[in-house]
Amino acid sequence: MATPAIQRTTGPLDGLRLETSGPPGPADQLVADHLRLLGAEGPDGPGAGLTLTGGDFAPLTARTAWGTAPGVTDEATAQAATGIMAVHGRRDGAPRGLAVDYAATATGLLAVQGLLAGLLAQTRGGSFTTVDVTAERAGLLAVSQYLAADGAEEGEAVELGPGGPPFTAADGTLFELETLDPGAWAAFWRALGAPEEAIRRGWRPFQFRYATACAPFPPALHDVTRASSWERIAYAADSSGAEVCPLRSLAARAREYDGAAPWQLTPYEVAHSSSAQARKAPLSGLTVLEAGRRIQAPLAAHLLGLLGADVVRIEPPGGDPLRGMPPACSGVSARWLALNRGKAAVELDIKSTGDRERLRAMAAEADVFLHNWAPGKADQLGLEREQLAAANPSLVYAYTSGWADRLPGAPMGTDFMVQARAGVGEAARPAGEPPAPSLMTLLDVLGGLLGAEAVLAGLLLRERTGQGVRVDSSLLGAADVLTAPARDRIARGLDPRRPAGFRRPLATRDGWVAPADACAAEASTYDLRELPTADALELLRRHGLAATAVTTDLSELHHDPRFAGSISRDTHGAPAVPDPWRFA
């Protein structure tokens, strides 16, 4: 992945040097690139066993590996074992591998987080010198909300089955549709002449596709768009309040790519005194105030909480409505628990002047304020960085957005719309298949990881400079990180998409197996359909081919011997994945 060229005045890693040693890991290039963007000096290229040295810091090393689970040796097998293939394949009715290196990308972002957290702990009296991250744990984190739902005590509120966007216009244009308003949904389809029954039946799977990774729409909806010109579809969206976005190619994204880093750190002058008291966890004693919705900001805050911060959620009167989203464990949404367990909560009506004052008072005592409100909302409420920093100049103000104001005229900044606009729909599928954004929330998860990384960088910069910091991250930044290898292939004159059939699991009599990428061509020459999965794996291994069983039922991960002891249950009985880092 090429390092973007950006202008940077002060970085949290200024004065530190990046050194490499040891065996290569799955995400060394990404880790090295991000550390250099944050100010570390070091040789170009990926290296391995990345260590930061210099200044008043003890050497701190990040080590990444695929994992300890038998058969998990590369991206394909990590996706297969952790359930990524199963979730991504729900739209198609069978497991499918992502053609992008999703597990490795998540591993790299978590490793950068671990390094920043370890350095931050050193500034506050801690003594961490190593951080270990594995792709298998990164993969489990990526599917944690789906795992929690599959392991809940009740069933889903909607049908799970093949199907979903993108839609196709009469001229072949593939496009995504987005709206959060059932009235806009109905008006859009009525403008195209869709049957009322199909409109009614289609809303619920459309609304829940973020949670289920599939959307079995009535076929009439797809039939209507195939019979409509793109001009008519665009007019229907404009007149109804819905939004549509044609799927753009990787080449188009490469041409407009601005080279920006996936986050922006903006210091502002303050006086800040830090405590040198030793603490058990890297962020112990720090308070994060989170006003987040859906996945991106809540996941970022969740990760900061796993690192030891006290996280306080701001919820509307009556509590976050997503707490009641099925399926539930002990009366609480399993998906909600996956992102929010362990957080405190305060109910505030931010439309109320009095409650906004309460929020400002809480921010005055916090270390971080994190939100992912719609663009302009914080300013309208008087809750922008300037207003909150007036009472707390040392605040790290974090905004996780859709577009980071980098694409004028961009559509609604939701996961699937950003996938469509940024070329992820093409990158996620190999050549020979029509582009289609994954219905697994790829960018919401990576956006949450980037958001946590940005906050940690901001906290470290605050400790080193005595300045409060505004940090901005986005789903577009997440998309650019994920598709960087494809853009690099374009720059070298190569096909940005992976070859036809890439990462397609092989069917067995009772399931699926996924060969490692380097073994896939030879493994596909064997007919495994009449063999039980265990025998199919043994056959491939006898021929020197690495492979693993594909997890198809995430609820079985709790008992999967490959992850023995890794997955626990929280106090509500919901499955909980292990922390992604190991510090020493």
Image (tube, rainbow, N blue to C red):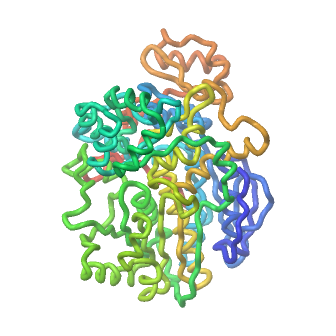
Q: Up-down: is 298 above or below 548?
A: below
Q: Nearer the viewer, residue 159 or 506?
A: 159
Along the horizontal axis of the image, is 109 left or right of 333?
right
On the image, the x and y values in percent for residue 476 come to 55, 55
Q: Nearer the viewer, residue 102 or 167?
A: 167
On the image, the x and y values in percent for residue 36 come to 71, 64
Q: Nearer the viewer, residue 92 or 46?
A: 92
Q: Up-down: is 326 above or below 359?
A: above
| Residue 114 seen from this side | no
Along the horizontal axis of the image, is 553 left or right of 462?
left
Residue at image point 39% right, 70% down? 377
| Residue 426 seen from this side | yes
Q: Nearer the viewer, residue 530 or 49?
A: 530
On the image, the x and y values in percent for residue 249 come to 61, 41
Residue at image point 56% right, 79% down? 462
On the image, the x and y values in percent for residue 288 come to 41, 72
Report how many numbered discs are placed on residues in the image. Answer: 0
Along the horizontal axis of the image, is 439 left or right of 453?
left
Along the horizontal axis of the image, is 563 left or right of 362?
right
Quadrant (top left/top right/bottom left/bottom right) for the C terminus = bottom right
Q: Up-down: is 68 above or below 114?
A: above
Residue at image point 24% right, 36% down? 200
